């Protein structure tokens, strides 16, 4: 007899503070470090920063804003987004769908992964009330149609189109998206099956160029005209960038201005706009406090790395803002550039940064690494047994300027 168990790959984040009555009651990062003296990574969520970013984005965008759950599915993050006015969620797996439905019975959930398993389609539709599905192939259209065909209601169907190079740090059009001819054919085939029909694209993550949206919206318009069918929604995807120490993207308003102008040029009255931001809503609202375990020259061996919350600091070479948190007072040593080694035995577990810290940083010091609310916590693994971490909600401001929020002074001693 065999027994198949579902088992989580990583230990759950141990929570120190999960709910609060008002933000004043939340501790600060420095205060938590002093109290806990954490020897394992401490994930810090800033609910007020996340809620403010959500408010700014929804105020600036002329349509519905779907949060891309994969970017950070922590319940504390989702609750902060809800508080900031987010009511739509872009999910890509049945686990994400289930999580959002459990937290928010009234949420509108959209299944925006172009390749889904049949059981996931069935369960999303029948159990969780998901009505919108994205696709970029005839195979997927057939799957969706078959798995929900027992029902009299019709799904919303969204055709994802591929884009040429956009100037994004992470391009997604190599993996997903229909080419022009296929998209036209899909729109025509989907129209009679759909309660509402949409065109979707994704400019790529951390896309620094507002003109990418101008060009993508123009392309979507050409596809729609060529198809000659009524399209109800244009989903301009995610990819809206945030600042990192080595990247200074144009303000959100520049992206919105290009989107609005491109939309007007389409001249398709009645076409609704959707967006699916992930990073832009949550990056500034998360950080991780790590501890220095050894210093060797300008390299610091720390207790988190590319198999933990710092995946993007490895192969993708992202820089993140850092500040020293030390028990007692820092003498105000001048800053210098450091690199990090993660805790695993793997030589790929290296992050060259540069990460700017006082030159006297030493074993036992804590370092807060910021702008990690997006694609940080959610990417950690249990590799090599480094699976422990704790989570706390804090009242600190963002470590870099985030939509709707002033940044905090860049260095501080606990
Ligand atoms: C990842 C993803 C997003 C969010 O992208 P960001 O770059 O974090 O804004 C939105 N939509 C889809 C379909 C995605 O896969």
Image: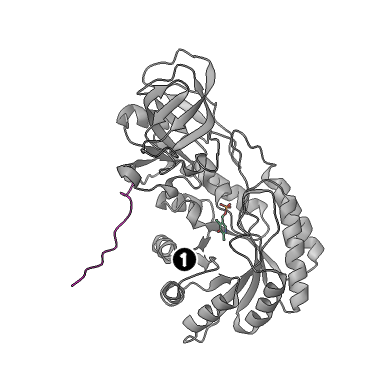
Q: Position of residue 310 (x, y in %)?
A: 46, 41
Q: Which residue is mark 1?
A: 106
- Where in the image, quadrant-wise, is ligand 1 located? bottom right
Which of the two residues, 5 or 324, is positioned nearer the viewer here? 5
Q: Main secondary structure of the magenta part?
A: loop
Which type of secondary structure does the marked residue at label 1 adopt?
loop
- Label 1, ligand 1: CB separation under 8 Å: no
Confirm whether the magenta stretch covers residue 215: no
Q: Position of residue 110 (x, y in %)?
A: 53, 67
Q: Position of residue 223 (x, y in %)?
A: 74, 71
- Residue at 49%, 29% in the rendered image: 339
- Residue at 36%, 22% in the rendered image: 363
Q: On the rendered structure, is 219 left or right of 105? A: right
- Number of marks in picture: 1
Corner quadrant of residue 198: bottom right
- Residue at 46%, 87% in the rendered image: 150
Q: Relative to 8, is 292 above or below?
A: above
Specify whether residue 30 is in view.
yes
Q: Relative to 8, is 50 above or below?
A: above
Specify whether residue 28 is in view.
no
Check the image and name the residue furthest to the left. Answer: 1
Q: Relative to 161, is 288 above or below?
A: above
Locate the C terminus and report the quarter of the image it occupies.
top left
Q: Position of residue 289 (x, y in %)?
A: 41, 34
Q: Which residues are magenta?
A: 1-13
Render colour scheme = one colour
């Amino acid at each position: 007899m065999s027994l198949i168990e579902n088992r989580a790959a990583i230990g759950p984040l141990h929570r120190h503070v999960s709910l609060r009555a008002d933000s004043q009651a939340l501790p600060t990062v420095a205060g938590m470090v002093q109290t806990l003296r954490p020897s394992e990574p401490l994930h810090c969520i800033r609910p007020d920063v996340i809620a403010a970013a959500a408010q700014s984005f929804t105020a600036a965008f002329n349509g519905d804003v779907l949060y891309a759950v994969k970017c950070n599915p922590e319940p504390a993050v989702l609750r902060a987004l809800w508080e900031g006015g987010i009511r739509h969620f872009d999910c890509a797996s049945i686990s994400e769908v289930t999580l959002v439905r459990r937290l928010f019975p009234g949420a509108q959930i959209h299944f925006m992964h172009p390749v889904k398993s049949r059981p996931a389609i069935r369960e999303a539709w029948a159990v969780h009330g998901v009505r919108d599905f994205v696709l970029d192939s005839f195979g997927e259209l057939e799957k969706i149609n078959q798995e929900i065909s027992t029902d009299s209601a019709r799904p919303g169907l969204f055709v994802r189109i591929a884009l040429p190079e956009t100037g994004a740090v992470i391009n997604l059009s190599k993996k997903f998206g229909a080419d022009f001819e296929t998209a036209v054919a899909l729109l025509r085939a989907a129209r009679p099956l759909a309660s509402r029909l949409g065109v979707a694209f994704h400019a790529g993550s951390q896309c620094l160029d507002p003109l990418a949206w101008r060009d993508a919206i123009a392309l979507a318009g050409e596809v729609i005209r060529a198809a000659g069918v009524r399209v109800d929604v244009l989903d301009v995807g995610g990819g809206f960038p945030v600042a990192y120490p080595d990247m200074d993207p144009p303000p959100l308003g520049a992206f919105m201005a290009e989107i609005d102008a491109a939309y007007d040029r389409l001249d398709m009255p009645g076409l609704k706009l959707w967006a699916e931001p992930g990073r832009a809503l949550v990056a500034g609202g998360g950080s991780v406090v790590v501890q220095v375990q050894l210093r060797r020259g300008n390299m610091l061996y720390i207790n988190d790395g590319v198999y933990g919350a710092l995946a993007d600091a490895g192969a993708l070479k992202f820089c993140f803002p850092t500040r020293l948190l030390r028990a007692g007072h820092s003498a105000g040593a001048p800053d210098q550039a450091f690199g990090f080694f993660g805790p695993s035995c793997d030589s790929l577990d290296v992050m060259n940064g540069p990460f700017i810290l006082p030159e006297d940083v030493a074993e036992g010091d804590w370092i807060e690494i910021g702008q990690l609310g997006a694609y940080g916590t959610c990417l950690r693994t249990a590799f090599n047994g480094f699976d422990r971490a704790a989570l706390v909600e804090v009242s600190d401001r963002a470590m870099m300027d985030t939509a709707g929020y002033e940044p905090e002074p860049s260095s501080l001693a606990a």
